Amino acid sequence: MPRKKTKIIIDTNLWISFLIGLKTSAAIRNILTDGSVSIVMTERLEREIMAVAARPKFNRYFHPDACQQLLSFLRKRSDNYILHDIPHQCRDPKDDYLLALVQVSDADILVTGDKDLTEMNQFGKCRIFTLKKFQEVFLR
């Protein structure tokens, strides 16, 4: 019987860091190439990545085409879920959709740099990690 893939949601802030090419890039690249991982996405996360990447302050770090290439890759590589109801569940309401995505997808891990989420540590069965903590636990 095949082993169940680990479902991982990666928050926008880490995708932007990946595009910039910060030291987080290698860790995210490891996640993307790990055959035992299933990346979880939703249209709302995709829209947020596009909106943040389009901010003028990022023009000097990467070309807008890089964001489109990443999203094209993610559309092929990810499991996409539709969110219907997004109840208020987080200190920051802008993050509620990520917790709704956790529930809809039955995600195992949410990786984020957002303190409102990382302070929760867990949401249902989903563990919430910073990228650094995720690396310490899973990428050793």
Image (cartoon, grey):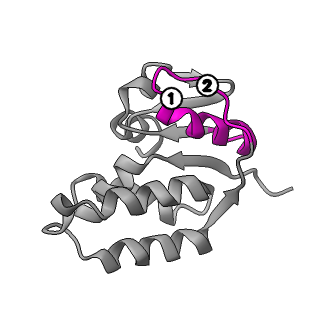
Q: Are marks 1 and 2 in contact (CB under 8 Å)?
A: yes
Residue 17, quarter of picture? bottom left
Q: Residues within 10 Å of mark 2 (few under 14, many from 20)?
A: some
For marks 1 and 2, give the CA distance. 6 Å
Q: Nearer the viewer, residue 130 or 12?
A: 12
From the viewer's perspective, tell me whether residue 45 is left or right of residue 65.
right
Report the magenta residues as a range.
85-108
Looking at the rendered structure, the secondary structure element under dot 1 is: helix
Q: Residue at x 76, y 52 (%)?
A: 3
Image coords of residue 132 (percent x, y): 33, 37
Name which residue type carries label 1: Pro
Q: Which mark is residue 93?
A: 1
Asked whether the viewer can see residue 29, the reply is no
Is residue 97 one of those drawn in magenta? yes
In the image, 89: left or right of 58?
Answer: right
Dividing the picture into quadrants, the one containing residue 116 is: top left
Q: Is residue 97 visible?
A: yes
Compared with residue 108, is residue 57 higher up or lower down, i.e. above or below? Answer: below
Q: Earlier in the sequence, mark 1 or mark 2?
A: 2
Residue at left 48%, top 35%?
94
Where does residue 76 sit, x and y in percent of width and height? Answer: 61, 74
Q: Which mark is residue 88?
A: 2
Numbered circles on residues, count: 2
Residue at the far right in the pictured view: 1
In the displayed structure image, the side of residue 111 where residue 105 appears, left or right? right
Residue 103 — which label?
A: none
- Does the magenta-highlighted stretch encompass residue 93? yes
The amino acid type, in three-letter code, at marker 2 is: His
Under tag 2, what secondary structure? loop
Q: Residue at x 68, y 27 (%)?
A: 125
Residue 17 against residue 127 in the figure, above or below = below
